[in-house]
Image (tube, rainbow, N blue to C red):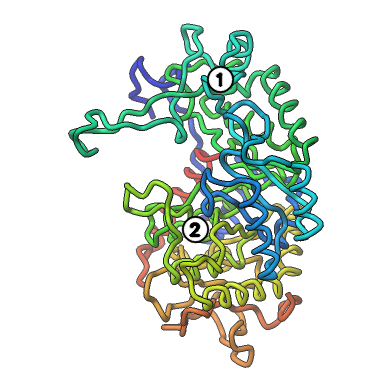
Amino acid sequence: LQSKLDEDSSFLLRNNFLEYTLAVPKEWEKISLKDFHQECFELFLAAPTAHPSLEIINKPIWSTWANFWKAVDQDGLLEYAKQISDNNMPISQLELDDMWTVSYGDYQIDKRKFSNFPEMLKKLENEFGIKRLSAWVHPFVDADSEVGKNPELRNKLFVKNRDGDVPLVWWWDCPVKPRDPSKPVGPTNPDIKEPCSYVLDVTNPETREWWYKQLEAMKAEGICTFKFDAGEANWLPHNYVLYDGAYPNSYGKHYAHFASRFGSAVENRYGSGTQQTNFFTRTIDRNSYWDKDGGLSTLIPWALQSSLHGYYWNLPDMIGGNGLNHNESNIRGEPPEEELYIRWTQANTLLLAMQFSYPPWHSKYGGEVLNIVKKSLEIRKKWMHYLIKNVRKSVEEKVPVIRPMWWASDDNEALTIDDQFMVGSDLVVAPVIKSGQKARNVYLPEGNWRNGNNVSEVVKGPTTIKDYPSPLDVLPHFYRTDSDDSGNGSSSIFGSSMGLFSLIISIIISLYFLN
């Protein structure tokens, strides 16, 4: 393969040719896709060497982001904590998101919004039982911040371009203005993105140590851990040159390793070749709608993709999404409709971890939402022992916790399923992810499977249950009758053997390029 990038590309190329490896099994008609995947996985990828915080797996994170956006303050945070406590909701840590510092890059708690931070922390613990507060951080430093205005720090800490300058970059908290303010934004009047920040060069050891000291100072203020946002090379300046970066992905690799210094309760959303870390790799923000354009339908495929590439500790983003929808004028966002919120909760119930922001008692919702969410949390509690057992097993045996259906079966139907998944070997989860749907087909691999919603019913697989009843309060799930943890815790497009071969090849190429 040869790249077609010109000299004005965003990064420098060592050469225009890409070397890659194509893996083909010797007897591809005899080997299972799971076994072939694992063989290639050992050649090209890596698995985590330790598990993340079990407390976060056991209890949800509650984030201020979608619910407050940038308007969070001390009174609002305490009221949010009170509501969580009053509604008897489990919580592992409370996450303080955007706009808690004086400015981006100056790591000082904004006293205008949090007038008595130590007292707030005491109230969180003593009145509401919340012992852990995490905070949102990122590599951007505003030009008008104290750090950004310091020429010595600016020259020492930030990403430069090929001319040795330190350029500003645009990111999502920078201004966006229409080219012609008198006309509506559109193809003939596109947005103008105004750069406003510098980017920390985390490939530079001196930058990492400076940032580490800033965050350690925040921990001394009572913040327990951090949610690391961004980290992708696309946020770097045009024609950037890193202190230590032979490849564009070098930035993300250093970024993830830096985040890992803050422990197993960290959230990070990007890495490259960093599967061995033991923090949570967060799914990038999902939007509050149903379809595959960043909506609910992408939740399971993203979790499966993470698993197959060795990022076993996937944290699906906030339940219900970030409040944004297809209405581009929706600046702050609104909670998703009741049905979407409920189905999103169910889809997330038996994934590795849960994170709420919009609360199920939101004024937009009726009491049914809270009741169904609590029912989902009871299902999760029932299977928590099994989930944690598989987390530990995944470290020991280098196998994912969340698995595609073809992990248990190579038949054509299993190869095409992207709306259900397995937890370990013994639990099949098939949430409803389509609007208005009250029944769905459920595929079960070989074995005897007990209906999680009707334990007297046992179904022999492999089979597809047609139109399994799935009213709004039901999460379809089945478990093997011989499971140690039972009670505890469409037509195929690959209709031929050559179709399976093509699928195998595409997966291996994907495994190589996305590592």
Q: Position of residue 506 (x, y in %)?
A: 44, 48
Name the residue at 39% across, 62% down.
Answer: 290
* SS at mark 1 in the image: loop
Q: Which mark is residue 200?
A: none
Name the residue at 71% across, 79% down.
Answer: 486
Q: Position of residue 162 (x, y in %)?
A: 47, 10
Residue 43 in sight: no
Name the residue at 56% across, 86% down.
Answer: 459
**Picture quarter containing residue 404?**
bottom right
Residue matched to label 1: 246
Residue matched to label 2: 299
Look at label 2 and name its amino acid: Leu
**Of the pair 58 and 89, the residue shown nearer to us:** 89
**Picture quarter containing residue 147?**
top right
Name the residue at 52% across, 14% down.
Answer: 160
Look at label 1 and name its amino acid: Ala
